[in-house]
Image: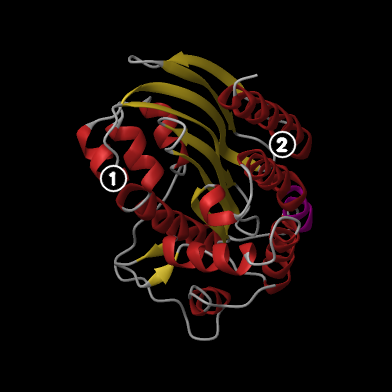
Amino acid sequence: MVFKDQVVAAYQKIQDEICGSLELADGKAKFEEEIWSREGGGGGRTRIMQHGNVIEKGGVNFSAVHGKLPDAVKKAFKVESDEFFATGVSIVMHPSNPFVPIIHMNIRYFEMDEQTRWFGGGIDLTPHYIIDTDARFFHHLLKQTCDKFDPSFYPKFKAHADDYFFIKHREETRGIGGIFYDRLKPENTGLSFDQILEFSKAVGNTFIPAYTELIDRNRDKEFDEKQQEWQYLRRSRYAEFNLVYDAGTKFGLETNGRIESILMSLPPLAKWTYNHQPLSGSQESDTLSKLKKGIVWA
């Protein structure tokens, strides 16, 4: 089997398994699927869950697209060729309970020719309220996944996530980070492409044990209107990052991707309150104090 076809098959399997597990975890909502084709080449499967017991809105998307790269993307990637192939799974979950965190995962493979190809991706957590034990659990799982392949991966990819998921205009991280990596290939990892694919699959397979545990810990916690208002404020920061800085959003828009699939990451409801300042000593203030780079969670 051609290597890129192996990647496509692996990513489709991961999408299927994650969707099935999330439906079980939610207990009410089911994914709606849209099969779409991209003008220029390829397509994907967009799967959206809404109005569930736990998930207010979430998407688990798969795509495999090909065609000609726009000049702006060629310049950003520093490549000369026109033809490209890209495949990946992208996930964002927005829960209804403020104590269940937002989660994002992306695993992807990009190829232009035998010499120009790489893997990228990552998984990160954006709690509305940072709970230290949850943060440590999440990072510990990611470290375990990374350590199976290379002990240097977790600290390196964790630092990369801290830098990447940073809202510069707010001077705060989007959440508690996770891992983020790009352009992984044999030359910079010491692994073969087959081994890097196994790592990419392992990251994908970390999603369900991580998120279902966090759902179970927090889904039944009671919350009041003030806490929901805070959730809407934190969602607004999430939207700001995705629209201003997110590389995947930019790539999708610049390659004439499917707009509904690209913007499925945005929350169903968010609020922008002018100059909101949480009370000193409150849960909200404590969360803000931990939206910093370099916190050691694992």
Considering the image in quadrants, where does the C terminus appear?
Answer: bottom right
The residue beneath circle 2 is 22
Instruction: Say above or below: 46 vs 174.
Output: above
- Per the rendered image, the range of residues in magenta is 212-217
State the image coordinates of residue 241 (x, y, percent, origin top left). 37, 55
Q: Is residue 66 visible?
A: yes
Residue type at numbered disc 1: Lys
Lower position in the chain sequence, tag 1 or tag 2: 2
The residue beneath circle 1 is 78
Dividing the picture into quarters, in which one does residue 133 lie? Answer: bottom right
State the image coordinates of residue 151 (x, y, percent, origin top left). 69, 66
Dividing the picture into quarters, in which one does residue 217 lie? Answer: bottom right
Q: Assign a secondary structure to mark 2.
A: helix
Q: Assign a secondary structure to mark 1.
A: loop
Q: Tell me if label 1 and label 2 are in contact, CB under 8 Å.
A: no
State the image coordinates of residue 269 (x, y, percent, origin top left). 44, 45
In the displayed structure, does residue 269 sit left or right of residue 197?
A: left
Instruction: Say above or below: 129 vs 278.
Output: above
